[in-house]
């Protein structure tokens, strides 16, 4: 200490660990090790440099009359959910040309806020033509609330070409992979329009729409997709999320692996302990300068009982890290299934038996 006489010693602190988190620690040694890890992480913050890209001007908003006319022409079966002045629909590319243009416009706007997206005037690709589009429409404001893009594997894989799946660009699926064993729904390109991101109903209606679609197409038992880990996250946060959740499924491999930012302190902690999601959340919030938490969609899938298979870098999506996961929908927690399906519909879906060949 005498050698430091006359010098400034900088001290940094993370957030206070709330008492409610103490239930996750086995004993005082476990608590001490966790707090020590927090200190090391606070000392070792390393920024994740977002890749710069040229951003073209966003395309013009579509005329609301064109959207309404297209939506009104959809068959009755394409309406999945009605709630107040909101409705959830599904449609194919050729059914909603104007609506899909607006969806791709809003996707690009939303993704750019997270340093993702294509950088083009809208976020579109050839998979939009073959995938099913699920979206929520606000009839009062005449606006798109949010959307999902769904790949129906039993239809897309009829020619046995994995290239028909968008995620085959990021991951190698071996013959025994979970999505090749039975009809599955590949979920992707999810977004909630910026105007509705503080709305409780936006994500709820999207998921009620997904489950309504599954109820009317009960052959789909597995949902799978990726959660993007925005380049606004520090590399250290992404490393911790990967270390905590990645189950390293042998039947799936990333074409481009994410390079973890490892340290002796992180390795030492994970050799001794598992990290529950609330404690992971606290570490990430301490690392991030804006105090942001892990992605809300990742938390949602975790609540659904998701398995996390691999973390890969999506070269088609501004080199964004994406966590591949799957959900056995019929085995998700009853409380959530009751909310998204309804009690009777849930039971009917769970009892469905696929026809034997």
Image: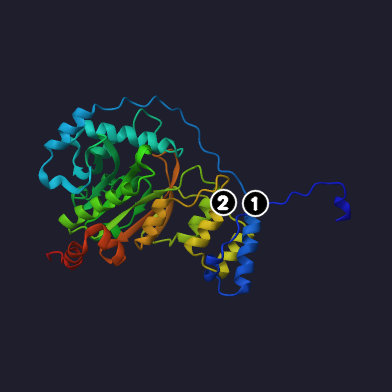
Q: Is residue 222 above or below residue 123?
A: below
The location of residue 329, given as percent across then percent down, is 27, 61
Could you classify mark 2 by the number of other residues whose Cα lies within 10 Å: few (under 14), some (14-19), or many (20 or more)?
A: many
Q: Are marks 2 and 1 in contact (CB under 8 Å)?
A: yes
The location of residue 25, given as percent across then percent down, is 55, 71
Picture disc at residue 44: 1
The location of residue 97, given as percent across then percent down, is 20, 32
**Along the line of sight, the residue nearer the viewer: 74 or 86:** 86
Provide the secondary structure element on which disc 2 rests.
helix
- The mark nearer the N terminus, 2 or 1, is 1
Tell me the distance, in whole angstroms, between the alpha carbons under discs 2 and 1.
Answer: 8 Å
Residue 285 visible to an observer of this rendering? yes
Could you classify mark 1 by the number of other residues whose Cα lies within 10 Å: few (under 14), some (14-19), or many (20 or more)?
A: few
Residue occupying the point 62% across, 49% down: 45
Residue occupying the point 30% across, 51% down: 204
The reply, left or right, for residue 17 in relation to residue 127 is: right
Provide the secondary structure element on which disc 1 rests.
loop
Which residue is under mark 2? Answer: 236
Quadrant holding the C terminus: bottom left
Quarter-of-image position of residue 75: top left
């Amino acid at each position: 200490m005498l050698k430091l006489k006359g010098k400034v010693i900088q001290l940094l602190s993370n957030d206070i660990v709330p008492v409610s988190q103490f239930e996750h620690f086995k004993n005082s040694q476990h608590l001490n090790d966790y707090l020590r890890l927090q200190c090391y992480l606070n000392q070792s913050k390393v920024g994740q440099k977002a890749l710069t890209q040229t951003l073209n001007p966003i395309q013009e908003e579509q005329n609301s009359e064109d959207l309404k006319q297209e939506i009104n022409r959809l068959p009755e079966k394409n309406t999945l959910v009605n709630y107040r002045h909101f409705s959830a629909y599904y449609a194919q590319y050729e059914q909603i040309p104007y609506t899909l243009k607006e969806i791709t416009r809003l996707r690009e706007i939303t993704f750019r806020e997270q340093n993702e997206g294509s950088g083009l005037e809208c976020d579109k690709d050839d998979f939009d033509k073959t995938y099913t589009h699920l979206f929520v429409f606000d009839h009062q404001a005449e606006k798109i609330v949010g959307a999902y893009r769904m790949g129906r594997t039993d239809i897309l894989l009829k020619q046995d070409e994995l290239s028909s799946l968008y995620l085959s660009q990021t991951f190698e699926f071996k013959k025994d992979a979970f999505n090749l064993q039975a009809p599955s729904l590949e979920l992707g390109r999810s977004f909630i329009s910026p105007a509705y991101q503080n709305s409780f109903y936006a994500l709820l209606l999207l998921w009620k729409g997904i489950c309504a679609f599954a109820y009317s197409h009960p052959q789909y038992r597995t949902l799978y997709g990726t959660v993007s880990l925005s380049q606004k996250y520090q590399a250290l946060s992404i490393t911790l999320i990967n270390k905590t959740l990645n189950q390293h499924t042998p039947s799936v491999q990333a074409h481009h692996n994410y390079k973890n930012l490892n340290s002796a302190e992180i390795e030492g902690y994970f050799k001794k302990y598992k990290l529950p999601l609330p404690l992971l959340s606290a570490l990430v919030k301490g690392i991030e300068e804006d105090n942001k938490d892990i992605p809300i969609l990742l938390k949602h899938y975790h609540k659904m009982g998701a398995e996390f298979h691999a973390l890969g870098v999506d070269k088609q999506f501004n080199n964004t890290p994406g966590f591949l996961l799957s959900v056995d929908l019929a085995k998700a927690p009853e409380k959530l299934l009751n909310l998204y399906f309804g009690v009777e519909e849930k039971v009917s879906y769970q009892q469905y038996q696929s026809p034997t060949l």
